[in-house]
Image (tube, helix red, strand yellow):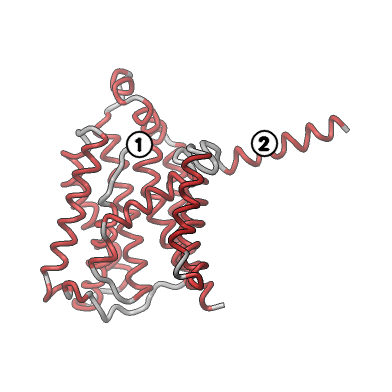
């Protein structure tokens, strides 16, 4: 039971981060391989504030998110003006720079040995609550004017600009929302695991999140949630098959990419699926 609660909690923390990645990749069409670096900023800053400065946990999380968003603003202002492929390269470089910085600041962060002594503050209920809040926030953003403009930019940036959309402003807005959610997931993670080290926040974690979004359906928030739930929980469930779980994970991803390139749900959201289900039931009744 404890094992499954642990898996569920970590899935909820991952959902907060993936909700942010969905805003960036699913809505706006930008690819970042440095999102995990912002998770690291949230984890380390909140941990340092609580452990070394005795700041209360809630205030430390707020401060960590603000600092991460500030860094994201500095990085994002020049980055969002680049082409999509260059954004990936710049964010990858930023992520590697953050990892190198954490490794070198031994006195402050513990360096490669990691930062220890973080108290356990994150509970399963807390992680679940914030996962729901993050999903609702992203769903609201998607249905808002900004979300529709993000979708227009994803479809054709030049056409969106011709229609009067302030492309840099919308892209930086989605980037900063993504950074805020990702950094907050780092706070939850640090105070659940009670230990962090730079190797946790490499580019592979950022790539995993992008894979989760594509696996579930890059154009669907519901699909991204489903993809994150399956792909973050699967390795833990298959822990007993330690020698084979990576192979099973890879095969599953390859099957989806090859046989359903749009992801499990494609562009469908939960509301769309419910409407289709009701429509089929109604049609069946009429036929009967």
Residue 115: image x %, image y %? 23, 75
Q: Which residue is mark 1?
A: 28
Is 110 situated left or right of 249 in this image? left
Q: Which residue shows up at 35% across the image and 54% down it?
A: 181
- Image-quadrant location for residue 17: bottom left
Circle 2 sits in a helix, a strand or a loop, which is it? helix
Is 110 situated left or right of 40 in this image? left
State the separation of the CA atoms marked 2 and 1.
27 Å
Question: Tag 1 or tag 2, which sits nearer the N-term?
Answer: 1
Quadrant into which the C terminus falls: top right
Answer above or below: position of 16 versus 155. Answer: below
- The answer to whether residue 237 shows anywhere in this view is yes
The answer to which of 220 and 183 lies nearer the viewer is 220
Q: Residue 125 — which label?
A: none
Name the residue furthest bottom. Answer: 117
Q: Mark 2 Cα within 10 Å, few/some/many (few <14, many 20+)?
A: few
- The answer to whether residue 129 shows anywhere in this view is no
Circle 1 sits in a helix, a strand or a loop, which is it? loop
- Image-quadrant location for residue 106: bottom left
Residue 171: image x %, image y %? 28, 36
- Image-quadrant location for residue 23: top left
Name the residue furthest top. Answer: 162
Q: Which residue shows up at 54% across the image and 44% down it?
A: 264
Quadrant into which the N terminus falls: bottom right
Residue 215: image x %, image y %? 47, 46
Q: Which residue shows up at 11% across the image and 70% down it?
A: 105
Answer above or below: position of 95 versus 104. Answer: above
Residue 95: image x %, image y %? 21, 54
Q: Mark 1 Cα within 10 Å, few/some/many (few <14, many 20+)?
A: many
Q: Which residue is mark 2?
A: 276
């Amino acid at each position: 039971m404890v094992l499954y609660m642990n898996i569920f909690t970590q899935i909820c923390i991952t959902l907060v981060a993936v909700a942010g990645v969905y805003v960036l990749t699913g809505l706006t069409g930008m690819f970042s391989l440095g999102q995990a670096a912002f998770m690291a900023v949230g984890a380390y800053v909140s941990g340092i504030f609580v452990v070394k400065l005795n700041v209360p946990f809630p205030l430390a999380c707020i401060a960590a998110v603000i600092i991460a968003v500030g860094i994201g603003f500095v990085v994002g202002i020049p980055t969002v003006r680049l082409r999509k492929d260059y954004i990936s390269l710049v964010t990858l470089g930023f992520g590697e720079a953050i990892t190198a910085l954490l490794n070198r600041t031994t006195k402050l962060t513990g360096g490669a040995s990691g930062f220890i002594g973080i108290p356990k503050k994150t509970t399963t209920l807390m992680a679940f609550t914030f996962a729901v809040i993050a999903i609702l926030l992203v769903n609201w953003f998607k249905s808002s004017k900004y979300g529709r403009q993000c979708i227009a930019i994803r479809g054709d940036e030049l056409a969106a600009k011709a229609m009067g959309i302030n492309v840099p402003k919308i892209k930086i807005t989605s980037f900063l929302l993504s950074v805020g959610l990702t950094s907050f997931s780092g706070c939850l993670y640090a105070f659940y695991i009670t230990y962090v080290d730079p190797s946790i926040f490499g580019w592979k974690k950022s790539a995993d999140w992008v894979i989760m979004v594509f696996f579930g359906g890059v154009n669907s928030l519901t699909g991204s949630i489903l993809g994150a739930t399956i792909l973050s929980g699967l390795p833990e469930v298959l822990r007993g098959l330690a020698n084979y779980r990576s192979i099973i994970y890879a095969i599953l991803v390859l099957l989806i990419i090859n046989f359903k390139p749009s992801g499990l749900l494609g562009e469908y959201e939960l509301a769309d699926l419910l409407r289709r289900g009701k429509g089929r039931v109604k049609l069946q009744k009429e036929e009967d």
